[in-house]
Image (cartoon, rainbow, N blue to C red):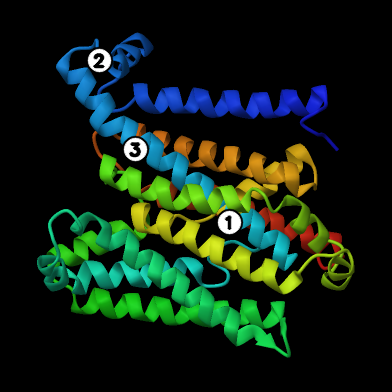
Amino acid sequence: MFGLQTAAGFKLFSALGAVVLAIAAAELAYGPVSLSLSEVSSAILGWGDASSTAIVTQIRAPRLLLGIAVGTALALSGCALQGVLRNPLADPGLIGVTGGASVGAAATIVLGDALALELPREIRPYLLPVSAFLGSALVTSFVFRLSRHAGTTSVATLILAGVAINAIAGAAIGVMVYISDDRQLRDLTFWTMGSLGGANWTMVAVTLAVVSVAAAALATLGRALDLFQIGERAAFHSGLNVERTKRNIALLSAIAVGGATGAAGPIGFIGLVAPHMARLIIGPSHRLVLPASALLGMGLLLGSDLAVRNIVPPAEPPIGLATSLIGGPFFLWLLLTRMKGRGLVA
């Protein structure tokens, strides 16, 4: 298919980049208070009036950067997990990564008030994302340990364990909802729907630091993921350390998704849809699909955020609703396509 060294490949990546830049510019310009691009530029450079400068630099720019980090994390993690599991229906939620992060964050929202009071004020903003990351890391570690037998990791056991973990996570969040007070229930309900509305520069700095490391490492695994497509035995005989690569991808996905979920809540389907769109556009090579997935993840998340902010201003529906409305039909289409390919439906 296409490569970055070819004219067609360069044009495709340039087009994807241009679309993301256009959505990013719209994210800074449009909202309950719309600004022209010249006003946005002036605000960024410090030449604008106080009102437009505050809107751009304190509200929309942090939101934009958080959306870039979260979209990249979810898309790259989904792409890597689909590749290593050789399952095009996989996403970070399949093996319990998102569920673990959600339980960690929910426990912090409902039970963390006393702990937060004991922490220095400077550390308190980090409590929620750290809890989400720890939840995702613990669940990922448990699921992979459970699925290992005789030195190898069973993909079937991994997926079944993820299903069980997601059920347990749902029950745990239900308990948190039951014991929460009105304020905690409101915060928890809104958080579980996903939103970039809580973005601030502290959260952006923490999320970018966590996600950037994991995303950069995931982006280097294109050759390894390509080898997985020919089977684990063939990949092993090609010189790939199969089990170590699986562990690395699981750990990096947990780091990326945990950081993203802690900052924005559980946002579904980006990790499923973006890699498939990338494969349709670029081809099967993961060395190209990974960066294309990152760009598409950014574009899908920022586009969804732009839509929910401008549909019924100044009200702001959770972004998770928009991504589910996009991803749900796509998932059904993908499932039906696979079933038709196997002759299971007419």
Rendering quarter of residue 46: top left
Which tag, 3 or 2, sits closer to the chain's start? 2
Q: Does residue 25 appear left or right of residue 74 in this picture? A: left
Which residue appears at 68% of the width and 71% of the height? 244
Q: Is residue 329 visible?
A: no
Residue 63 is labelled as 3
The residue that disc 1 covers is 77
Camera-near label (1 vs 2) is 2
Q: Is residue 273 or residue 338 the one in the foreground?
A: 273
Amino acid at circle 2:
Gly
Q: Is residue 76 left or right of residue 262?
A: right
- Give the residue type at disc 3: Arg
Disc 1 secondary structure class = helix
The image quadrant that residue 19 belongs to is top right
Quadrant (top left, top right, bottom left, bottom right) of the C terminus:
bottom right
> Tag 2's secondary structure?
loop
Residue 180, given in percent of the width and then of the height, sits at 18, 73
Q: Residues within 10 Å of mark 2 (few under 14, many from 20)?
A: few
Name which residue type carries label 1: Ser
